[in-house]
Amino acid sequence: MNLIDIHSHFLPGIDDGAEDSDVSIEMLSDSMSQGVEVIVATPHYYGKKRAVDDFIKLREESFLDLSQRALQKNTKLPKILLGAEVALTRGISVRENLDMLCIQDSNLLLLELPFEKWDAWVYNEVERVISNWQITVILAHPERYVRMPWDIKKLKPFFDMGVALQINAETVLEDKGWTKRFLKSGCPCVLGSDAHNMHKRKSQMGAAAKRLTELYGETLLEQINEVYDILGLTY
Ligand SMILES: [Fe+2]
């Protein structure tokens, strides 16, 4: 099965992910050995830290660094798309050029919600991101914002806004029931590694795909890939 990893911090030297291009290449080779054919670079974007244009420039430099190193080492890479993991902060919906943070050639934005308790502004801001920019929001790892099964009601307003959900591979492997709940939510669901390195936060896409197939049958991964077609991701 061809896997698409929509959430990964493999770009070198831009966030808390890969520290240099050698680690990046190791991460990408490891992903390919697990069956990943397409991978989206999603370095953290924090609006308080820099403007969108500056982030794009940094990301280009980081990608160039990686590409040159891969060429030097004659290493085959998976298909790479450029994106970002955008932290939801107050006012992000009116940030200049926010749409440039969407995943390459799409209107899909990977959005990370705050980890502290949510007030109304969180829901309002997500709603404005969607309506101001005609963006489809993919919520990064929704399982990380909820602790108990009944907490899923916190996420319900986002489900009603038509978001897609990105489940982390490690969540599938932990098997605490979240995958099943999200698959039943009615929202399009996709899978991401959220890999940061080759030790503690390594990609587990292959193992997660295997577990999903055991739990939900052969067709689930095909359905996940179809979600990308529906969402308009070209790769
Ligand atoms: Fe992440």
Image: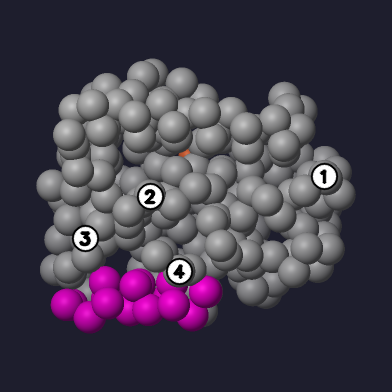
Labels 2 & 1 near each other (Cβ < 8 A) = no
Residue 93 visible in rendering: yes
**Nearest the camera: 199 or 98?**
98
Callout 1 secondary element: loop
Q: Nearer the viewer, mark 2 or mark 1?
A: 2
Q: Amino acid at mark 3?
A: Ala
Q: Position of residue 181 (x, y in %)?
A: 43, 68
Toward the viewer: 79 or 112? 79
Would residue 125 be found to the left or right of residue 135 on screen? right
Residue interval drawn in magenta:
217-232
The quadrant of the picture occupied by the C terminus is: bottom left
- The label on residue 209 is 3
Residue 80 shows which numbered tag? 2
Q: Is residue 121 left or right of residue 226?
A: right
Name the mark on residue 95: 1
Determine which residue is flagged by label 4.
Answer: 234
Q: Is residue 50 left or right of residue 5?
A: right
Secondary structure under tag 2 reads strand
